[in-house]
């Protein structure tokens, strides 16, 4: 009898405990916020735009990316840096590009003539300058262009003039100085201005032509600026929305930022001369 009573009491306690738990759960459910169609959900993914830009814009554009995206959280910028001529050919080949920023006018003009950019969005936004640099430990006494004709100077770094604006400007400067023909066999072609800079940094050439802004990004103690190189054509950078862009409004937002006060301040910080400010 006693054992049976004890078992009965234990079972009764268990049932009472279960009942309390169920009541507690019901109380919690009654006070919980119901999930409805109006409950906030995570926001949409930002629209991604691709900006193809001259290699010399690498540091400045990368710097302004976070500032632009903070002000435009619905836009995510992907950069594609390289020689302006190669970038232009990618656009001609149908690459999915939204904005093109060139280091010279000719490649932008080509796209404009082919109706591959939105001409109403095109704007010149900065200028640069051409300089002659040498390795910091150079044993050669190079003080100007004429010294490049010295037989001891065997290799000169220059961007490929057909696709790289810095090479086109260098070729123009050498032509105007009457030095192009005697120096052609010494030329080591780079695929963009950064490539030429690396040639000089690594002492793989005796001298090289780069933009002033790129010379300022060289590894400390690796190069020396010899002289500024005058060219008859200003080193001007245009930017425009690509006609085939599927995100024209977002692309124009980026163009407006680059040509606006905030973008121009960043570009000036890296040594460019602002035009749109």
Image: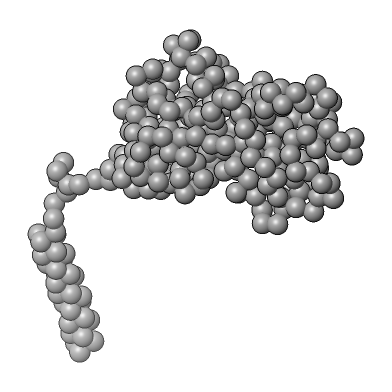
Quadrant location of the C terminus? top left
Q: Position of residue 20 (x, y in %)?
A: 14, 72
- Total numbered circles: 0
Coordinates of residue 266 in the picture (x, y in percent): 43, 46
x, y percentage for residue 157?
75, 35
Which residue is drawn at the image coordinates 59% and 32% (left, top)? 82
Residue 54 in sight in this render: yes
| Percent position of residue 166, x then y | 63, 31
Seen as rendered, the residue at the extreme top is 114
Residue 45 lies, with reference to residue 66, above or below; the image says: above
Vertical relation: 77 (above or below) 25: above
Looking at the image, which residue is at 47% across and 49% down?
269
Q: On the image, which quarter does residue 69 sit in?
A: top left
Quarter residue 175 falls in: top right
User: Does residue 174 appear to the left or right of 275 in the view shown?
Assistant: right
Which residue does the image show at 65% across and 49% down from the upper left? Answer: 218
In this picture, is 273 found above or below 184? Answer: below
Q: Is residue 26 visible?
A: no
Q: Which of the two residues, 203 or 251, is positioned nearer the viewer here?
A: 203
Q: Is residue 83 left or right of residue 26?
A: right
Indicate left or right for 69 with 7 as reference.
right
Q: Is residue 188 left or right of residue 209?
A: right
Pick the front one: 74 or 51 = 51
Q: Quadrant of the N terminus?
A: bottom left
Colour theme: one colour
Q: What residue occupies the far bottom of the structure in this picture?
A: 2
């Amino acid at each position: 009898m006693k054992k049976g009573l004890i078992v009965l009491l234990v079972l009764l306690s268990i049932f009472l405990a279960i009942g309390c738990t169920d009541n507690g759960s019901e109380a919690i459910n009654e006070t919980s916020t119901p999930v409805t169609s109006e409950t906030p959900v995570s926001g949409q993914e930002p629209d991604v735009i691709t900006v193809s830009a001259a290699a010399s814009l690498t540091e400045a554009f990368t710097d302004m990316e976070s500032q632009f995206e903070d002000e435009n959280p619905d836009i995510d910028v992907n950069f594609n840096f390289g020689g302006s001529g190669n970038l232009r050919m990618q656009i001609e080949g149908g690459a999915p590009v939204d904005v093109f920023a060139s280091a010279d006018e000719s490649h932008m003009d080509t796209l404009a003539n082919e109706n591959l950019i939105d001409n109403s969005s095109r704007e010149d936004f900065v200028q640069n300058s051409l300089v002659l640099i040498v390795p910091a430990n150079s044993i050669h006494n190079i003080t100007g262009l004429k010294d490049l004709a010295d037989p001891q100077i065997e290799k000169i770094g220059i961007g490929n003039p057909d696709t790289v604006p810095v090479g086109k400007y260098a070729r123009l400067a050498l032509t105007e100085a009457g030095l192009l023909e005697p120096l052609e066999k010494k030329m080591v072609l780079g695929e963009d201005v950064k490539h030429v800079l690396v040639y000089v940094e690594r002492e793989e050439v005796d001298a090289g032509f780069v933009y002033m802004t790129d010379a300022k990004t060289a590894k400390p103690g690796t190069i020396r600026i010899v002289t500024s190189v005058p060219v008859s054509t200003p080193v001007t950078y245009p930017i425009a929305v690509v006609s085939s862009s599927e995100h024209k409004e977002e692309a124009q937002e980026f163009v407006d930022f680059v040509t606006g006060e905030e973008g121009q301040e960043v570009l000036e910080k890296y040594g460019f001369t602002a035009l749109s400010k």
